[in-house]
């Protein structure tokens, strides 16, 4: 079966790498992909928002399955376009992807169905939002309603920081129309956890749990990013808490979406907080594989990813058993200097071809005219170590990360440290 993966980051590299292992996979295409993905798939020079061109390509090549990686095209209805042409596609329709595309929709859904989440209020104009904000204690969380490349959330620890974030979103419009509404919610303390699940309607098949590191600097300091590193499993979080999250949050949300006439098919990503009383609460839902969570979850998958995708598309996910490895995985993201603000591109990358002890998923790379690797994004590479323990996997990831150099390279040095305490 020939497969088209849509997207061009580290998540899509991990998906292509995993699909390429399937004996049932034929030709693998990725649009637009990146230079690293070109090692496992044929790159197609079509952008993720060129829906008609992508559908025409899939028809022309007789593609048997399309897999959509990023959030923006899902929110804009790319799955509906493929379904209208009877092209099998893995991912939620536009009305289901709304669970990520609108934070106010998500929060209202959880409130309606009694699913645990932080207390919140929503606003569509600046003055009432500011007045409410000034009446609440800090820390407090301000979220742009729409998609903002993972950067539309501010955890404000001072009133000045909170008011500046609100002004940026609603007055300065730094996220455009994504900031036409805001959600202001209580700050939750505790351990963060991500659970990705394969979902087909009310059928939920959770993946191995992972934990992301969002802030750019060690010790969870600095701006939020798309993610500076991840690890899986989570030895410091009791299995019972993970099971409780699945039973009290993820499964009820899948049922709620069906009840709302928005059945979800694809990957439902739950961003959760384990509060000090040991209870999981919902921070966010995403409508796709996480990035860089995918880079540590898929290397632990023992089952055939293509079989799982096809079962979800065909409505037979309830008949599939999914096996996970006992191995641990740690991903260290190597970022460009300046990320998540502005950063240079085109800088030579040394040492990449010398890495043997770890997996390397490319997020923002290209090849120059001489064929050498160069940087081409904010997050450049995800270096993934595998081992019998978090400590072993972490050592391998950092050893490999040190081999790779480019001007201005930045990475956190404390990925997965919480799991070693």
Image (cartoon, rainbow, N blue to C red):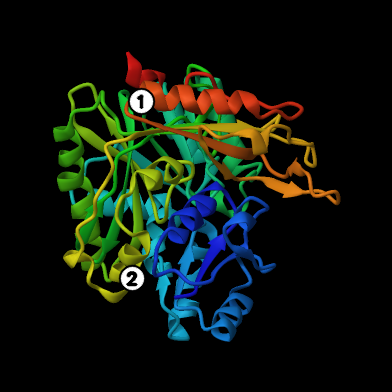
Choose the circle earlier in sequence order: 2 or 1.
Answer: 2
**Where is residue 277 drawn, in percent x and y?**
18, 23
Residue 158 vs residue 414, the one in the foreground: 414
Viewed as shown, does residue 274 lie left or right of 346? left
Residue name at image x 32 percent, y 23 percent: 189
Name the quadrant containing residue 307. Answer: bottom left
Which residue is identified by label 2? 310
Marks 2/1 in contact by CB < 8 Å: the verdict is no
What is the crowding at mark 1: few (fewer than 14 residues within 10 Å), some, or many (at least 20)? many
Considering only vertical position in the picture, is 315 above or below 391?
below
Spatial CA distance of label 2 from label 1 is: 32 Å
Viewed as shown, does residue 129 lie left or right of 305? right
**Where is residue 329 drawn, in percent x and y?**
39, 34
**Where is residue 35 drawn, in percent x and y?**
68, 52
What is the crowding at mark 2: few (fewer than 14 residues within 10 Å), some, or many (at least 20)? some
Determine if residue 117 is in view. Answer: yes
Which residue is identified by label 1? 390
Question: In the rendered image, which quarter contains the N terminus?
Answer: bottom left
Determine if residue 156 is in view. Answer: no
Residue 20 vs residue 362, the one in the foreground: 20
Residue name at image x 54 percent, y 59 percent: 72
């Amino acid at each position: 079966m020939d497969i088209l993966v849509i997207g061009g980051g580290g998540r899509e590299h991990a998906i292509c790498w995993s699909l390429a292992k399937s004996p049932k996979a034929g030709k693998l295409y990725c649009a637009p992909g990146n230079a690293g993905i070109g090692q496992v798939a044929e790159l197609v020079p079509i952008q993720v928002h060129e829906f008609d061109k992508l559908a025409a390509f899939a028809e022309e090549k007789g593609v048997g399955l399309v897999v959509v990686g990023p959030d923006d095209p899902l929110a804009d209805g790319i799955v509906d376009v493929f379904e209208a042409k009877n092209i099998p596609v893995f991912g939620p329709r536009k009305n289901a992807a709304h669970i990520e595309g609108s934070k106010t929709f998500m929060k209202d859904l959880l409130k309606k169905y009694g699913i645990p989440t932080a207390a919140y209020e929503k606003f569509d104009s600046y003055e009432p939002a500011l007045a409410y904000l000034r009446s609440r204690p800090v820390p407090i969380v301000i979220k742009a309603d729409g998609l903002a490349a993972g950067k539309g959330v501010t955890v404000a620890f001072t009133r000045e920081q909170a008011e500046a974030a609100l002004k940026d979103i609603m007055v300065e419009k730094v996220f455009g129309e994504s900031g036409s509404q805001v959600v202001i919610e209580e700050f939750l303390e505790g351990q963060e956890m991500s659970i990705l699940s394969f979902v087909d309607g009310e059928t939920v098949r959770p993946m191995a749990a992972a934990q992301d590191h969002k802030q750019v600097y060690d010790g969870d300091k600095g701006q939020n990013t798309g993610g500076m590193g991840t690890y899986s499993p989570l030895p410091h979080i009791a299995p019972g808490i993970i099971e409780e999250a699945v039973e009290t949050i993820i499964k009820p949300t899948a049922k709620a979406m069906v009840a709302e006439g928005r059945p979800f098919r694809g990957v439902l990503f739950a961003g959760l907080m384990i509060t000090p009383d040991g209870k999981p609460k919902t921070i966010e839902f995403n409508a796709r594989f996480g990035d860089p969570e995918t880079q540590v979850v898929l290397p632990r998958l023992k089952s055939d990813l293509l079989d799982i995708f096809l079962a979800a598309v065909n409505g037979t996910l309830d008949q599939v058993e999914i096996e996970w490895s006992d191995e641990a995985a740690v991903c260290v993201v190597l970022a460009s200097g300046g990320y998540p603000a502005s950063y240079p591109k085109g800088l030579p990358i040394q040492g990449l071809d010398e890495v043997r002890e770890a997996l390397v998923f490319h997020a923002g790379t290209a090849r120059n005219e001489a064929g050498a690797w160069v940087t081409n994004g904010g997050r450049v590479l995800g270096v993934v170590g595998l081992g019998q323990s978090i400590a072993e996997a972490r050592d391998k990831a950092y050893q490999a990360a040190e081999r790779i150099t480019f001007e201005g390279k930045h990475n956190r040095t404390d990925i997965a440290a919480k799991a070693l305490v």
